[in-house]
Image (cartoon, rainbow, N blue to C red):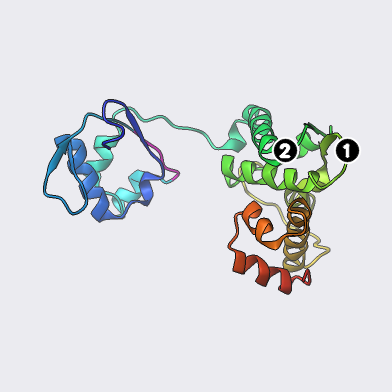
Amino acid sequence: FELADGGTLFLDEIGELPLSIQAKLLRAIQNGDIQRVGSDKHVQVNVRLVAATNRDLQVEVQQGKFREDLYHRLSVYPVNVPPLRERSGDIELLVGYFIENNRTKLGLQSVRLDPRLMPILLKYSWPGNVRELEHIISRAMLRAGTRSGRITTLMPSDIDSISDEIQLFPNVSNNGVSAEVTEITKDFSEMVDDYKRNLIMSAFKLSQNNWNKTAQLLNVDKSNIHRLGKRLGLK
């Protein structure tokens, strides 16, 4: 709050706050002052709040999980952001943005999309919304980055986690309601292990066969990556 004094403070996932913290936030909004941890001194702040959540706060209020008074304080000007599956026009823009971010981070010279890739991304229902898209593109870039060549091309095989789902569940609509599944040709846990194995090996190559750097690249704890590598037969 102090750093945002005179400006705007964005509070993400506001619905995750425990009730005890909600009470403190409400006091800060009502009184325009805060107390530092371990201090009795009140500090005046002038902050414009913007809060976001993926929960239905009205339901949370009814269930006693979110304070009604805080809900009304935060609901001065609500803005509803539809899920990604309802705004497919944003997918291409977001894909380009995430590709450029990862291209810089991975030190790749040039990246392009295989023409078959975008239709797959547009067909997928994106239950995890923008964060899922970001993670899918990041993993695809890791895989594609292991291939030689001046131009790195993202292929459908680089996003096989969602490609397989579309092929296994071709009748799943964008609202997430699934028709009957008539055939599954591969054990689900085996498919998940195959995906983890390929992803880890791609990062391992990019990290010049260094397991600790692989863990950093995948944002995984070092002990976990070693244990997972052994379980998947990679070590």
Q: Is residue 160 visible?
A: yes
Q: Which residue is the site of mark 1? A: 149
Q: Position of residue 82 (x, y in %)?
A: 52, 34
Q: Earlier in the sequence, mark 2 or mark 1?
A: 2
The residue carrying pointer 1 sits among few (fewer than 14), some (14 to 19) or many (20 or more) residues within 10 Å by Cα, namely: few
Left or right position of 78 against 205: left
- Look at 64% across and 30% down and name the residue there: 97
Write down the quadrant of residue 211 in the picture. bottom right
Q: Is residue 218 above or below residue 232?
A: above
Residue 223 lies in magenta, yes or no?
A: no
Q: Is residue 100 above or below residue 137?
A: above
Residue 53 lies in magenta, yes or no?
A: yes
Q: Position of residue 3 (x, y in %)?
A: 30, 35
Say which mark, if any, is on residue 107.
2
In-front residue for pair 54/208: 208
Q: Is residue 126 visible?
A: no
Left or right position of 210 against 82: right
Q: Which residues are magenta?
A: 50-54
Left or right position of 137 against 1: right
Spatial CA distance of label 2 from label 1 is 13 Å
